[in-house]
Amino acid sequence: MSKNVMKESVELLKILIMGTYVPIVIVKVDEPVLKSSKIIFGG
């Protein structure tokens, strides 16, 4: 059970990082890079 809680926490942390860090990076890159990163991140 504790392993499952850890996994949930990691997933939440990933979402938080993606939600804060990735948009900052995307703002700094231009269109072609943005399109390829969308493919990488499954956006």
Image (cartoon, rainbow, N blue to C red):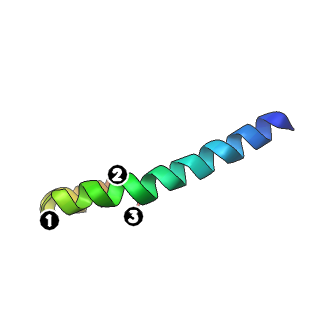
Work out how far the residue at label 3 is from the one at label 2, CA to CA, in angstroms: 8 Å
The mark closer to the camera, 2 or 1, is 1
Inspect the image, locate mark 2, and give the three-letter code of the amino acid beneath it. Ile
Regarding mark 3 in the picture, which secondary structure is present there? loop
Task: Name the residue rendered at 67%, 45% in the picture.
Answer: 9
The residue that label 1 is drawn on is 31
Q: Is residue 3 above or below residue 33?
A: above
The residue that label 3 is drawn on is 43
Q: Is residue 11 above or below residue 34?
A: above
* Residue 23 place in picture, x, y as percent: 32, 61
Q: Quadrant of the N terminus?
A: top right
**Residue 2 appears in which quarter of the rendering?**
top right
Count residues near mark 3 (Cα–Cα under 10 Å), then give few for <14, some for 14-19, many for 20+. few
Task: Name the residue rendered at 25%, 59% in the picture.
Answer: 26
Work out how far the residue at label 3 is from the one at label 1, CA to CA, in angstroms: 14 Å
Q: Nearer the viewer, residue 15 or 31?
A: 15
User: Of label 2 and label 1, which has the lower sequence position?
Assistant: 1
Inspect the image, locate mark 3, and give the three-letter code of the amino acid beneath it. Gly
Left or right: where 26 falls relative to 15:
left
Inspect the image, locate mark 1, and give the three-letter code of the amino acid beneath it. Glu
The residue that label 2 is drawn on is 40
Work out how far the residue at label 2 is from the one at label 1, CA to CA, in angstroms: 14 Å
Left or right: where 16 falls relative to 25:
right
Asked if disc 2 and disc 1 are in contact, CB closer than 8 Å, the reply is no
**Residue 37 appears in which quarter of the rendering?**
bottom left
Q: Is residue 10 above or below residue 31?
A: above
Q: Nearer the viewer, residue 27 or 41?
A: 27
Regarding mark 1 in the picture, which secondary structure is present there? helix
User: Of label 3 and label 1, which has the lower sequence position?
Assistant: 1
